[in-house]
Image: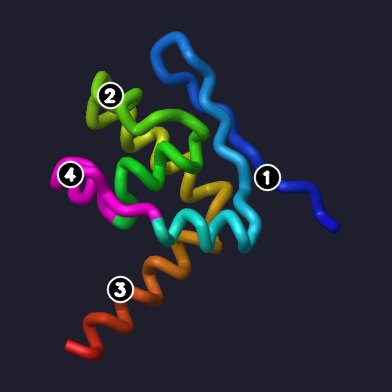
């Protein structure tokens, strides 16, 4: 079995480690509901709650994040978790076809 990918991103004075999720973790992640509209729509393709889950931190930690911070954190999450982002993309396309 291949070792899981990971990426460390500096966020303020904290190192956040994004780890590659396994299938069961992706299933859990897909069940997370946004806490408010900012959580749901601040980022393209992922909620703040989902990003926090991937980072292993509380979503409130992003309250002090700038747009640049969130872009960098999102890029790291996408780099190590293409499975999750691929599923999200395919689900979005399916919803568009059904409508």
Q: Nearer the viewer, residue 10 or 27?
A: 27
Task: Count residues near mark 4 (Cα–Cα under 10 Å), then give few for <14, some for 14-19, many for 20+.
Answer: few
Q: Report the residue marked by disc 3.
A: 92
Picture quadrant of residue 67: top left
Relative placement, left or right, of 61 versus 81 is: left
Residue sitting at x 34%, y 33%: 59
Q: Report the residue marked by disc 1.
A: 5
In the rendered image, which quarter contains the N terminus? bottom right
Indicate whether residue 41 is drawn in magenta.
yes
Residue 65, numbered label: 2
Residue sitting at x 61%, y 60%: 24
Badge 3 element: helix
Badge 1 element: loop
Picture quadrant of residue 65: top left
Q: Is residue 12 above or below residue 36?
A: above
Q: Is residue 83 above or below residue 17?
A: below
Relative placement, left or right, of 95 versus 73 is: left
Relative placement, left or right, of 68 versus 10 is: left
N-term-proximal mark, 1 vs 4: 1
Picture quadrant of residue 31: bottom left
Q: CA distance from mark 3 to mark 4?
A: 20 Å
Q: Is residue 5 above or below residue 95?
A: above
Magenta residues span 32-44
């Amino acid at each position: 079995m291949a070792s899981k990918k990971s990426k460390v991103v500096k966020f303020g004075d904290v190192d956040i480690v994004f780890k590659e999720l396994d299938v069961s973790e992706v299933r859990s992640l897909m069940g997370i509901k946004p806490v408010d509209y900012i959580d749901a729509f601040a980022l393209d393709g992922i909620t703040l709650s989902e990003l926090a889950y991937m980072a292993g931190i509380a979503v409130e930690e992003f309250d002090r994040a700038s747009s640049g911070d969130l872009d960098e954190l999102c890029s790291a999450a996408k780099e190590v978790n293409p499975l999750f982002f691929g599923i999200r993309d395919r689900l979005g396309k399916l919803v568009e076809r059904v409508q």
